[in-house]
């Protein structure tokens, strides 16, 4: 997750479906793709938390259609996805990493690249992040913020998507293995690439048919630190907004108390 949402570029050609689970180096992968593909990449975590309110609200709607699984709703869901991702050269991170089948249908020529990580380390990291996302006070603190007031609902529907796919609400190495097996079953072998960001430019450039950038180090983004910074940023915004609201209410109440005695004065 980065600290700034990407801006769509009209006419951009979609090329890569990032199918790696969250916390597998998706932020570094996103930055690398933006360099190699020379266009904006849609990183789900960043776009929904740092983008305009339409981002998170759109994905709640899309995922609700997906979870309900009604055949009649599928064209609407696909159109919403197509509109949301228009102008990007690639997607990474949730929720699109779990929607790669739909994305393959939309972009049959796209390469599917799954970022990987040691399953034990991934399990530990996901558990830490899930605890942060489920803090009991979030709904109240984020309520004054136009987009992030929907964050708890977004996390809820993401959880429903996860359960429908993997049959569990937990993040363990068994689930990680299920995701890898699902990719291998669905995606044609010549279109699927597994990639660890620790390996740097070479394997990624080879998969994309690109030359290794000269004099440009591979981007290393600390996903965990970025997520914590984003959480702190929105919590501060929410508390500041609440302070302003309560301040206005306090002033209004004080003025009202001054006015009321005058009404009953002789």
Image (spheres, helix red, strand yellow):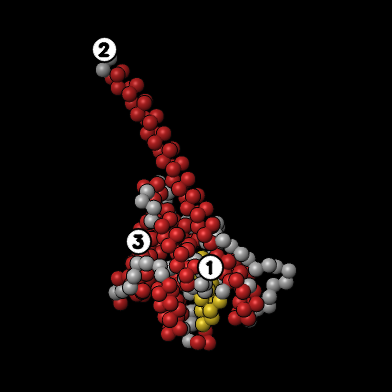
Q: Quadrant of residue 155?
A: bottom left
Residue drawn 63% across and 72% down? 200
Residue 2 locus on image (x, y percent): 55, 60
Cβ–Cβ under 8 Å for marks 3 and 1: no
Residue at which label 1 appears = 26
Q: Earlier in the sequence, mark 3 or mark 2?
A: 3
Residue 151 locus on image (x, y percent): 40, 56
Cβ–Cβ under 8 Å for marks 3 and 2: no
Residue at which label 3 appears = 156
Residue at which label 2 appears = 266
Q: Decide: few, some or many residues near mark 3? Use Cα within 10 Å; few <14, some 14-19, many ≥20.
A: some
- C-alpha separation, residue under disc 3 versus residue under disc 2: 59 Å
Q: Secondary structure at mark 3?
A: helix
Q: Quadrant of the C terminus?
A: top left
Q: Which residue, as the protein is rendered here, is positioned at the far right?
A: 215
Q: Decide: few, some or many residues near mark 1? Use Cα within 10 Å; few <14, some 14-19, many ≥20.
A: many
Q: 237 or 89: nearer the eye?
A: 237
């Amino acid at each position: 997750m980065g600290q700034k949402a990407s801006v769509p570029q009209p006419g951009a050609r979609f090329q890569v479906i990032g199918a790696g689970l969250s916390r597998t180096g998706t932020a570094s992968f996103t930055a690398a793709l933006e360099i190699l593909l020379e266009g904006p990449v849609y990183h789900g975590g960043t776009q929904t938390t740092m983008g305009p309110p339409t981002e998170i609200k759109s994905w709640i709607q899309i995922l609700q259609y997906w979870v309900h699984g009604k055949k009649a709703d599928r064209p609407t869901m696909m159109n919403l996805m197509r509109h949301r991702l228009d102008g990007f050269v690639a997607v990474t991170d949730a929720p699109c990493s779990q929607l790669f089948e739909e994305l393959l249908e939309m972009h049959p020529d796209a390469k599917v690249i799954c970022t990987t990580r040691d399953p034990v380390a991934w399990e530990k990291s996901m558990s830490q992040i899930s605890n942060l996302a489920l803090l009991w006070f979030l709904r109240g603190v984020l309520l004054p913020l136009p987009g992030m007031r929907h964050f708890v609902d977004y996390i809820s529907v993401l959880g429903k998507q996860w359960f429908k796919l993997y049959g569990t609400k937990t993040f363990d190495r068994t689930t990680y293995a299920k995701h890898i097996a699902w990719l291998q079953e669905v995606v044609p072998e010549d279109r699927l690439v597994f990639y660890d960001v620790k390996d740097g430019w070479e394997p990624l450039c080879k998969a994309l048919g690109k030359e290794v950038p000269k004099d440009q180090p591979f981007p290393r983004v600390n996903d965990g630190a970025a997520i914590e910074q984003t959480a702190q940023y929105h919590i501060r915004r929410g508390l500041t907004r609440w302070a302003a609201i309560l301040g206005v209410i306090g002033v209004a109440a004080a003025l009202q108390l001054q006015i009321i005695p005058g009404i009953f004065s002789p």
